[in-house]
Image (cartoon, rainbow, N blue to C red):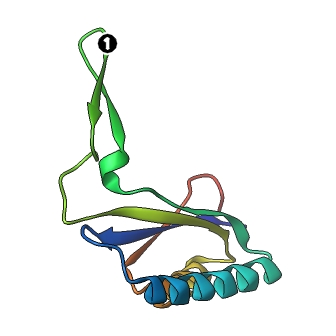
Amino acid sequence: MPRYLLSIYQPDGPMPSEDRLADIHRDLDALNDELKAAGGWVFDGGLHPASTATVLRPGVGDVLITDGPFVDSKEHLGGIKIVDALDLDAALGWGAKLMRATGLPVEVRPFLGWD
């Protein structure tokens, strides 16, 4: 069965209110339960702010290590979900449910070698 990465992008800035976060977590729990019941859940997780990132780059004979996200951007990767889906349409359906649960943009991409 094909495997897909659902990437959640969130804008830089303050976190939503506690009430809004509680709603998001409730909706995400319901989505995870639905995915598990359908046999499509593989893995998911949220990420700390982009400011906590460390980037490794190739250097001349060494590894260059820098603080901060890979790119300077107004939005960053906020979390991921990995799902098994019958096809791209099914993966897009899960992505749409994730987008509605979080209120954030979601990118859907297939893994190589899982189709």
Residue 62: which quarter of the image? Answer: top left
- Residue at image point 65% right, 69% down: 83
Dot 1 amino acid type: Asp
Residue 61: which quarter of the image? Answer: top left
Q: Is residue 61 left or right of residue 106?
A: left
On-image quarter of the N terminus: bottom right
Residue to which mark 1 is pinned: 62
Query: Does residue 53 appear in this view?
Result: yes
On-image quarter of the C terminus: bottom right
Q: In this view, does 7 lie to the left or right of 31?
A: left
- Residue at image point 40% right, 87% down: 103
Q: What element does badge 1 sit on?
A: loop
In the rendered view, tell whether residue 88 sits above or below residue 84.
Answer: below
Residue 30: which quarter of the image? Answer: bottom right
- Which sits in the foreground, 63 or 108? 63
Query: Does residue 99 appear in this view?
Result: no
- Count of numbered circles on the image: 1
- Residue at image point 66% right, 66% down: 2
Across and down, in percent, residue 113 comes to 62, 52
